[in-house]
Image (cartoon, helix red, strand yellow):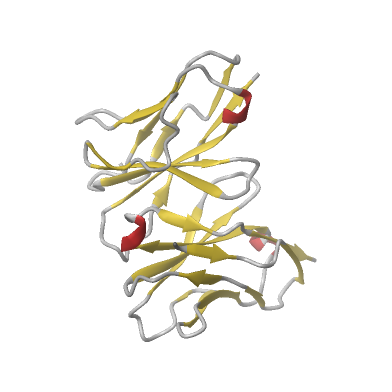
């Protein structure tokens, strides 16, 4: 598609439950990025993919966060055993990969942990 | 390490005036890109303008222009003839090869346009 599609828009989970977020990048874009934004403040980089391969995972909390980008499927970000501090908006962005191309963002998934 | 600094947490500007949002950066990369995004209260991220480190001309997109001063490592966003709809958070971001193409973000500036 022509837009980055993120689902769901809102996700509410009880503390300790699992949360799974999805992202369909723009067709033809080979790079996908996940960012976490807490309270509309700075963006924290989590992980990036080049096609289905992990490109950079330096921002990922290793214990509970995992992500995948499989062929012919939306990318996913999964949080196991959620904590209150995981409450944030999670943005997915995609780009062709040329350094002068902007990252195009989805509308984000607002995750609320109760 | 790469870093973006936005020193203005918030700004009030009268409608129709021009506004400059400050952004300074730090990087050891020779090749990098600078981006500005707008985030309205509805939350989506809107790409505004891009400046490449090797671009000789300042980037312009409609009412947006980027005042790029490479020696000073600054990339200020200028919005001409501000409108009420310009009220939003504005984020400056940098992408360089050192960062594996992830965007490094500033803290943002909240711009409020007064009627």
In this rendering, the answer to whether B80 lies above or below B107 is: below
Taking the spot 33% from the left edge, 75% from the top edge, the residue there is B30
Q: Where is residue B17 in the image (x, y as percent from the top left)?
A: 71, 78
Taking the spot 37% from the left edge, 59% from the top edge, the residue there is A102
Q: Where is residue B4 in the image (x, y as percent from the top left)?
A: 53, 64
Q: Position of residue B94 (x, y in %)?
A: 44, 63
- The C terminus of chain A - image quarter: top right
Q: In this view, does A25 lie to the left or right of A21?
A: left
Q: Quadrant of residue A21?
A: top left
Taking the spot 61% from the left edge, 77% from the top edge, the residue there is B80
Q: In this view, does A68 lie to the left or right of B15?
A: left
Q: Position of residue B38 (x, y in %)?
A: 56, 58
- Residue at the outermost right position: B115
Taking the spot 22% from the left edge, 47% from the top edge, the residue there is A28
Number of marks: 0
Q: In this view, does A108 lie to the left or right of A15?
A: left
Q: Is residue A29 left or right of residue B81?
A: left
- The N terminus of chain A - image quarter: top left
Q: In which quarter of the image is residue A88?
A: top right
- Residue at the outermost left position: A71
């Amino acid at each position: 598609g022509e837009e980055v599609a993120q689902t769901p828009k809102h996700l509410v989970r009880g503390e300790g439950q699992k949360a799974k977020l999805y992202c369909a990048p723009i067709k033809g874009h080979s790079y996908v990025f996940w960012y976490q934004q807490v309270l509309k403040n700075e963006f924290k980089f989590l992980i990036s993919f080049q096609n289905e391969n992990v490109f950079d995972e330096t921002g990922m909390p290793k214990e509970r966060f995992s992500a995948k980008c499989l062929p012919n499927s939306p990318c996913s970000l999964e949080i196991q055993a959620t904590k209150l501090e995981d409450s944030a908006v999670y943005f997915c962005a995609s780009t062709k990969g040329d350094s002068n191309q902007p990252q195009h963002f989805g509308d984000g998934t607002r995750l609320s942990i109760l | 390490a790469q870093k973006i600094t936005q020193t203005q947490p918030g700004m009030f500007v009268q409608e129709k005036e021009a506004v400059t949002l400050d952004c300074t950066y730090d990087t050891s990369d020779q090749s990098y890109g600078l981006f500005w995004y707008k985030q309205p209260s509805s939350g989506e991220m809107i790409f505004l303008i891009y400046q490449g480190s090797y671009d000789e001309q300042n980037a312009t997109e409609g009412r947006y222009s980027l005042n790029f001063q490479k020696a000073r490592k600054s990339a200020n966003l200028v919005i001409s003839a501000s409108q009420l709809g310009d009220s939003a958070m504005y984020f400056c971001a940098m992408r360089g090869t050192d960062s594996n193409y992830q965007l490094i973000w500033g803290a943002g500036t909240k711009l409020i346009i007064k009627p």
